[in-house]
Amino acid sequence: MINMFNNKLRGFTLIELLVVIAIIGLLASIVVVALQGPRQTARDVKREGDVRNIQTAMELCYGDTACGGAEAYVTYANYTAADTGGIGTYIAASNMPNDPQSGSSYTWVDNTADDQTFCVYATLEVGDTGEEMVYASETGFGHMASGSTNCP
């Protein structure tokens, strides 16, 4: 007589497979959460670089009498990429930096009527000691508290 119990097929049970899948899912979620901080920091570094580039273009524009001032390129609190005058001479409209997460433009404020002082700022995702914005102005570059609209 043939013994049916000796003819077992080897393989994994459904329970074993579900346990392994659950462990892999748990590890994957831990990795995704762990990578969130470095992604935010990387976007903040890009924002700081973008603000510095805009600052450089605005300083070059202010030094150039043919530039017409940055207000020729910037409209109200945000620049308009469609405009080709002003700092568009130094940064092409197609290369004008935008926020890496939202895609919106950085904020620009003209602080005086003579168009010789300016402030470009962006909100950071990861703040240091309550300084959650990065700014660039004719006086320099730095960090300021969130919600501020006046550059130091």
Image (spheres, rainbow, N blue to C red):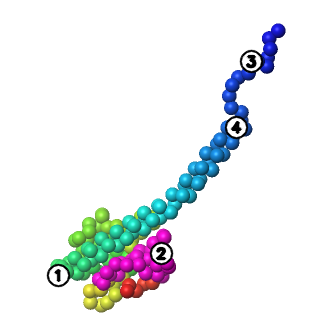
- Whether residue 65 sits left or right of residue 101 in the image: it is left
For mark 4, give the secondary structure. helix
Q: Check residue 16 in the rendering and tell me which mark sits there, or answer none.
A: 4
Could you classify mark 2 by the number of other residues whose Cα lies within 10 Å: few (under 14), some (14-19), or many (20 or more)? Answer: few
Q: Earlier in the sequence, mark 2 or mark 4?
A: 4
The stretch in magenta equals 119-147
Q: Is residue 128 magenta?
A: yes
Q: Earlier in the sequence, mark 2 or mark 1?
A: 1
Q: Is residue 41 magenta?
A: no
For mark 1, give the secondary structure. loop
Residue ID for mark 1: 65
Residue ID for mark 3: 7
> Label 1 sits on what residue type?
Thr
Seen from the viewer's position, the closer of residues 68 and 147 is 147
Residue ID for mark 2: 128
Q: Residue at x 61, y 45 (%)?
A: 24
